[in-house]
Image (cartoon, rainbow, N blue to C red):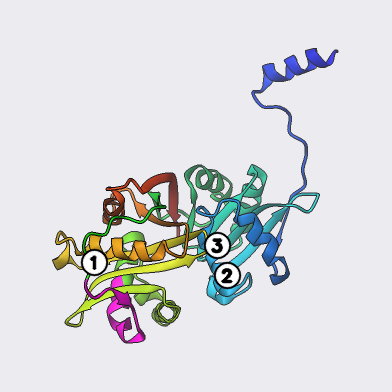
Amino acid sequence: MSAEQMMHTVMEETAYLPQPVVTLTVSELSETETNEVLGFLSERPVHTVCMTGLIRDNGLVSEHNRGTFYGCRNSEGRLEGVALIGHATLIETRSRGALREFALTAQIYNRLHMIMAEQEKVEEFWNYYADDGQPMRLACRELLFEMKNSPENRREADGLRLATIDDLHLIAPVHAAMAEAESGINPLKVDRRGFLDRCTRRINKNRVWVIVEDERLIFKADVQAETSEVIYLEGVYVSAEKRGSGIGRRSLTQLCKSLLERTRSICVLANEENEKRTLFTECAASNESAATILFSSNVKIG
């Protein structure tokens, strides 16, 4: 049989060319691999900002990551994937094989709370994981937005500042309530000390911005991760009595304008129906600086 006939036969049977057999191995990453891992993640800085931020803040091996970083390598030793598997499971892969290997590795953990990646990756991950993994408790679809240009700031928000430890008693209940609304679990109830420690650590790192009036939290936004390429915001909150007054938009606009002086873009992940989505896009509507860049399936399981 000629090469042409052989190729014709193959294409009649499958739409894909035959793939070479590649041996993949998964192992825990060590601090000596930090530069290689950061280089791998930097190829898609917006999609990987949370993992990159954790590594830059804590290192590859740290209890503050609330999980273990794994690398998946091919037979030539090159990385085909990096994943944080633990409370929050985050995945970045270059091959379907790496996705499968991470899913099988995740099955040995019994306290996964959330799996987050692009929709297609999460769905395929779940196909491999589901048989021997935790049952799914909740699945939701989220949108990732990115802002690259400073929004127009006609009027500044009075009182916007970095939070201090004296604000912890105001911040922690609000952040816990937001987490419960998203996942159905209140971290103050299931892990009070750990949650307060994490809030304290973030405040001490100058990552929380607030407006407080008369001992009431009016506005809050957290910098969850920061690199020279991307800053990832979460926990954007406006008190119920101030919603519709414009203070949320002014505060977020002012904050984004300030943050864009030290990074190339800002991103936020929000449920399709979440108010944060509207607030973030409103801040950039005048110059079209916010855009939906991907759909993400955020699967909460435990």
Q: Nearer the viewer, mark 1 or mark 2?
A: 1
Q: What residue range appears in magenta?
A: 158-174
The mark nearer the N terminus, 1 or 3, is 3
As drawn, is 13 to the left or to the right of 112? right
Quickly name the residue at label 1: 156
Which image quarter holds the N terminus? top right
What is the quadrant of the C terminus in the image? bottom left
Q: Is residue 292 above or below residue 199?
A: above
Q: Nearest the camera: 84 or 157?
A: 157
Dot in front, 1 or 3: 1
Q: Could you tell me which secondary element the residue under label 3 belongs to?
A: helix
Q: Residue drawn at (70%, 60%), measured in percent from left and top?
A: 36
Label tally: 3
Expressed as whole percent of the image width and height from the top left, the position of residue 135 reads: 47, 54
Residue for point 53% across, 45% down? 121
Q: In the rendering, at what x and y percent does residue 196 appear?
A: 39, 80
Cα separation, mark 1 vs mark 3, equals 32 Å
* Magenta stretch: includes residue 211: no
Q: Residues within 10 Å of mark 2 (few under 14, many from 20)?
A: some
Which numbered circle lies on residue 51? 3
Q: In the rendering, at what x and y percent does residue 91 appear? A: 56, 54
Amino acid carrying mark 1 in the image: Glu
- Which numbered mark, 3 or 2, is in the foreground of this view? 2
Q: Nearer the viewer, residue 38 or 115?
A: 38
Q: Secondary structure at mark 2?
A: helix
- Earlier sequence position, callout 3 versus callout 2: 3
Q: Residues within 10 Å of mark 3 (few under 14, many from 20)?
A: many
At horizontal 21% and vertical 72% (from top left) the residue drawn is: 158
Q: Which residue is mark 2?
A: 56
